[in-house]
């Protein structure tokens, strides 16, 4: 009984310590003290790697516009939580920023498998197809969005643009 109580107490202290460290990291990120945040993240990752910590690391690097490092952090985080919609989206966005549109498409599509009704993700996927000059696929993506939400002016403009570009290629 005494051993169980001691074990429970140790677990609770570890959980409180982790929570306090997470809050400290969050505050450092909010304050834009990115170097200190990275130091704290690395310290916590050494002790207890988690998807959340890798996400925060990627977020810091993304805010520093070091997209290669951000991408690496997000990919590491996905090894801990493969269906984390936020990390899938951030990974796709980093690939897109780095000019690797094919991998961006793959990650946006995987994110849409997890959350098929996320129209913002679908819109980003459509934009990547436009960047790749794949207007037919982009048209199909924006048509699917239009079927679910015909009131969004931005997506309607993207649909019209893809339609125009696709028809111009056909002629």
Image (cartoon, rainbow, N blue to C red):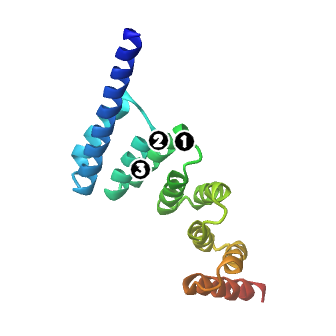
Which residue is under mark 1?
81
Quadrant holding the N terminus: top left
- For disc 2, the neighbor class at 10 Å (few under 14, some 14 to 19, many from 20) is many
In the depicted structure, whether residue 121 falls above or below residue 84: below
* Mark 2 and mark 1: Cα distance apart in space: 6 Å
Q: Residue furthest right?
A: 170
Tell me the element at label 1.
loop
In the depicted structure, whether residue 63 falls above or below residue 52: below
- Relative depth, front residue between 60 and 3: 3
- For disc 1, the neighbor class at 10 Å (few under 14, some 14 to 19, many from 20) is some
Residue 154 horizontal/vertical position (percent)? 55, 84
Identity of the residue drawn at 67% across and 62% down: 116
Name the mark nearer the viewer: 2 or 3. Answer: 2
Tell me the element at label 2.
helix
Quadrant holding the C terminus: bottom right
* Mark 2 and mark 3: Cα distance apart in space: 13 Å
Residue 51 bears which disc, if any? Answer: 2
Query: Does the CB distance between marks 2 and 1 fall below 8 Å?
Result: yes
* Mark 3 and mark 1: Cα distance apart in space: 16 Å
Rendering quarter of residue 43: top left
First-in-chain label (2 vs 3): 2
Identity of the residue drawn at 60% across and 55% down: 107
Which residue is under mark 3?
70
Identity of the residue drawn at 61% across and 74% down: 130
Tell me the element at label 3.
helix
- Relative depth, front residue between 109 and 135: 109
Residue 108 horizontal/vertical position (percent)? 60, 59
First-in-chain label (3 vs 1): 3
Image side of residue 105 versus residue 167, left or right = left
Image side of residue 76 versus residue 69, left or right = right
First-in-chain label (2 vs 1): 2
């Amino acid at each position: 009984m005494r051993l169980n109580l001691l074990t429970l107490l140790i677990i609770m202290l570890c959980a409180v310590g982790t929570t306090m460290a997470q809050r400290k990291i969050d505050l450092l990120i909010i304050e834009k003290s990115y170097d200190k945040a990275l130091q704290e993240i690395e310290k916590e990752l050494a002790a207890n790697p988690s998807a959340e910590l890798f996400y925060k690391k990627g977020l810091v690097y993304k805010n520093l516009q070091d997209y290669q490092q951000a991408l690496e952090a997000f990919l590491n985080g996905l090894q801990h939580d493969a269906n984390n919609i936020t990390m899938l989206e951030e990974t796709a966005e980093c690939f897109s920023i780095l000019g690797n549109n094919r991998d961006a498409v793959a990650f946006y599509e995987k994110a849409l498998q997890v959350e098929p009704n996320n129209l913002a993700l679908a819109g980003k996927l459509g934009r990547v197809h436009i960047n790749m000059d794949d207007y037919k696929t982009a048209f199909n993506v924006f048509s699917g969005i239009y079927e679910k939400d015909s009131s969004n002016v931005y997506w309607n403009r993207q649909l019209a643009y893809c339609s125009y570009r696709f028809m111009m290629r056909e002629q």
